Amino acid sequence: MVHGRSRPLLRVVPPVTVPEPRPAPSGSRDRYADLDDRRLAAILAAEDTAEEHGLNPHTRSTCYVHRCWAHQCVGDPLHVLVVTGHRWCRRCECPVDVAVDETPPGAVHLFCPRCGQAGSAANREVRQACRTSLSAMHGGDTPTLYRLPDM
């Protein structure tokens, strides 16, 4: 119990199993046609297109590999990018942990398991992408670069 609550405010996001890439259904260009969450599918497709036209892939609110909201899979080792410093502590040379509270308004914390710090421009991008992802999952605004019609 935490501060009178029956569940913790934050949880460390566990790694997820990376699904096998799936080809688009035959005769269809919608590679997300099989997703039940049509809002997620539409934003995935919009971010794919925006990325082809210059969207920084580190600012996506979705993950095309895991086919989910970015904050749901950010704990996967695949999202640790040593070269750019995304989910990486250069001081300790180790992956940074992520804690996400999915209940609105949601909170995202990145921290090094060794030194407790995670301050870098790359990790601020990760935190912001997760916050955008949380907002979009809960029906909030999508970034204006790829704003979608109401669903």
Image (cartoon, rainbow, N blue to C red):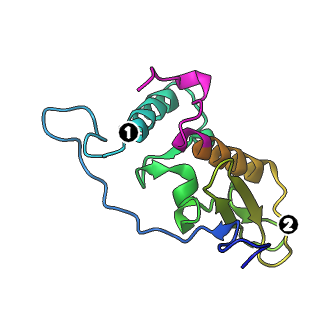
Residue 28 bears which disc, if any?
none
- Looking at the rendering, in which quadrant would you find the C terminus? top left
Label 2 SS: loop
Q: CA distance from mark 1 to mark 2?
A: 34 Å
Q: Nearer the viewer, residue 101 or 69?
A: 101
- Looking at the rendering, in which quadrant would you find the N terminus? bottom right
Q: Residues within 10 Å of mark 1 (few under 14, many from 20)?
A: many
Q: Residues within 10 Å of mark 2 (few under 14, many from 20)?
A: some
**Residue stretch in magenta:** 135-151
Q: From the image, state whether disc 1 or disc 2 is nearer to you.
A: 1
Horizontal and vertical percent for residue 116? 84, 72
Could you tell me which residue is drawn at 63 percent across and 59 percent down?
81
Q: Main secondary structure of the magenta part?
A: loop
Which residue corresponds to mark 2? 117
96 on left or right of 66: right
Q: Is residue 150 magenta?
A: yes
Q: Nearer the viewer, residue 125 or 12?
A: 12
Label 1 SS: helix
Residue 41 bears which disc, if any?
1
Could you tell me which residue is drawn at 53 percent across and 57 percent down?
72
Name the image quarter holding residue 74.
bottom right
> Label 1 is placed on what type of residue?
Ala
The vertical placement of 58 against 17, above or below, is above
Horizontal and vertical percent for residue 19? 35, 62
